[in-house]
Image: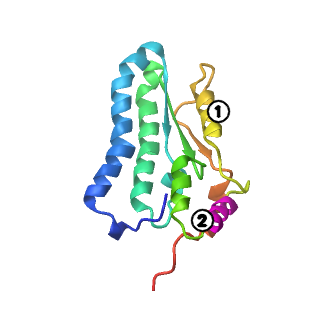
Amino acid sequence: PPPHPIDEFSAEDFRKLIDLNVVSYFLFSKYALPYLRLTEGSIINISSLVGNIGQGQAVTYCATKGAITSMTKALAIDESKYNVRVNSISPSNIWTPLFDSYLKTCPESEEVKKGFENNQLLGRFGTIQEIGQACLFLAADATFCTGIEINMSAGAELNYANKNMRPKAS
């Protein structure tokens, strides 16, 4: 996510982010479960790598994504008795229209983009299609997976210690 220090984030903004990133997942699961229990279906939540490892100036975002990952694991335990599988995917930097919009606000957008790419061990952004392929795998009837989190990160977590997204405090 774009840098957003906690002291510049209001409680109201945090509540909106919780509604968007946590409550919506809760409500989807709550209302889909009666059908999924009958069909032995699957829930696939999209979290984020930073929900596990954190990121500077992204406390609120990281908190909501960590909640999704925890909710996924707890729900997998509860729903296993109905053979409902619950898993999550935690992407790192995925090229999306939202990411493109963010980069357009950066004065040195090409340099910023290169920095993000360099933090991925594979040297590039992931694609929406790659996330879709992981979803197809998790949704398949033959998948022997529940309560797992797939990091779609190109190894970024191995390089996050080098991530320099925020200036030093003065």
Query: Badge 2 is on which residue?
Result: 109
Residue range in magenta is 109-119
Q: Quadrant of residue 112?
A: bottom right
Q: Residue at x 60, y 34 (%)?
A: 132
Q: Quadrant of residue 152?
A: top right
Q: Quadrant of residue 13?
A: bottom left
Distance from Cα at disc 2 to Cα at disc 1? 29 Å
Disc tally is 2
Residue 93 coordinates in the image, percent (x, y): 59, 53
Residue 125 coordinates in the image, percent (x, y): 66, 52
**Image check: 45 left or right of 108?**
left
Residue 101 coordinates in the image, percent (x, y): 52, 55
Assign a secondary structure to mark 1. Answer: helix
The answer to if 116 sits in the magenta stretch is: yes
Dominant secondary structure (helix, strand or loop) of the stretch shown in magenta = helix
**Image check: 107 left or right of 70?**
right
From the viewer's perspective, is residue 115 above or below residue 43? below
Outermost residue on the left side: it is: 12
Outermost residue on the right side: it is: 122
Task: Residue type at mark 1: give it.
Answer: Gln
Q: Residue at x 70, y 54 (%)?
A: 124
Query: Badge 1 is on which residue?
Result: 133
Mark 1: few, some, or many residues within 10 Å (few <14, many ≥20)?
few
Residue 25 coordinates in the image, percent (x, y): 39, 37
Q: Residue at x 40, y 54 (%)?
A: 63
Mark seen at residue 43: none
